Structure formats: structure tokens, C-alpha cells
Amino acid sequence: AEEFGVSRTPIRQILQMLESERLVEIRDGVGTIVTGVDFRRLRGVYDLRLRITELIGDSIDRYRARDALSEVTGLIERAEALKVRPDIRSYWVLESDRHRLINSLIANEPLREIHDSLYMQTSRAWYDISESVWPEALEALFAELVELRRALDVGDLPSIGFASRNYVAYSMTRLSRYFDPT
């Protein structure tokens, strides 16, 4: 709280939110502990992400989509730069910006909130392995951005959801190699 210049209340609220999403465990007398990755739960969240992401195309804000074309082009340029000069932190900023852009296209507020929450629940596991699968991770991100630009360019809004859905599926496949206990 002191570091960010806020009272303890917003910090407690954030920690409670993280606990409700099972990202941390608050133990009285011990403190707050970051939870480990439970692959079965992670797979369940990814399965739900796949279904939710398919719905995105039906809920795209048509006017916002027109503005997003230049943003996606900027993201593609940043991904191309990462191919030349790899930087894991810049990759994660780009990945986060990609997610925020797609989320901003969703006109249905409850769908947007669920989409965002599910992304947050899965992103930390992906973060753990992204350096290990760097070339593949960057290529998959680049491919999704190109597909998004193509869909936005022709106004094919359902394809935005399908491009994102495919990216989520590829992410789950890569994560399975690292976390699947079977």
C-alpha cells in the first residue's frame, strides 16, 4: 500500500479478487501465497475460453472494429520487431495489448468481463513457459494478429472470434506439453 501510495483497503480488495480467481491463497497468520498451477482446473478454464471465444464474433462492436484495424497493424509491426530482437518482456506487453484490443471489441459487457477473467486465469501458466517455447509462441501470436487484421480488413466479424479461438487452442496444446500430468 505504501509503495503505491494507496490505503490498505484497495490492496485487500485486489487480494480478495485474486483469491476468488484462485491465483492466490490468503492464510490467516501466514500471509498471501501465490497458488500453483492445477492443470485439470487450467484445462477446464481453457475449455471454457474456447467456447467463450467462439461467441466473440457474434458480439463485436462494428464501429469499434473499424478503428481496430490500425491498432492490429501496429501490433503486427511490434511482433515483427520481436522476431529480429527477441525480448520476453516486450512479448508479454504485446500479448497483453492483443488481449485488451480483442476485449475492447466485445460489445456485450458480461461476455467481455468473462473473456477477460478467463484470460487472466490462464495467462500466468503461459507466462511460466513462454521463454521455453519462444519461437513457437511468437509465431502463433504473429499468425493470430495477421488473421485478425485480415478479418477486420474485410469486415468479417465472426472470423475475429475464430482467429482468437484458434490461438487459444494452440496455446492449450503447447501448455499441455508442460503441465499435463498424464
Image: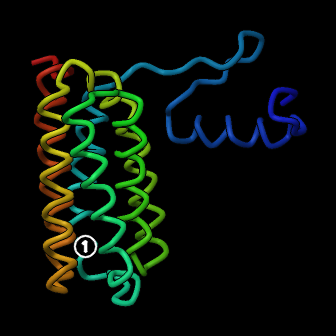
Q: Is residue 161 above or below residue 144?
A: below
| Residue 26 percent location from the top left of the image | 66, 24
Name the side, left or right, on which 82 lies relative to 32. left
How many residues crowd mark 1 within 10 Å: few (<14), some (14–19), many (20+)? Answer: some
- Can you name the residue that lies furthest to the top here? 30
Name the side, left or right, on which 77 lies relative to 2. left
145 or 22: nearer the viewer? 145
| Residue 59 percent location from the top left of the image | 32, 81
| Residue 5 percent location from the top left of the image | 87, 36
**Quarter of the rendering occupied by the N terminus:** top right
Residue 158 lies in what quarter of the image? bottom left
Residue at (33, 25) in percent of width and height: 38
Type of the residue with mark 1: Leu
Q: Which residue is mark 1?
A: 55
102 or 15: nearer the viewer? 102
Residue at (18, 19) in percent of width and height: 178
20 or 128: nearer the viewer? 128
Residue at (23, 77) in percent of width and height: 57
| Residue 112 percent location from the top left of the image | 43, 68
65 or 41: nearer the viewer? 65
Q: Is residue 119 above or below residue 24?
A: below
Secondary structure state at the residue bearing disc 1: helix
Count of numbered badges drawn on the protein: 1
Residue at (41, 53) in percent of width and height: 97
Residue 20 lies in what quarter of the image? top right
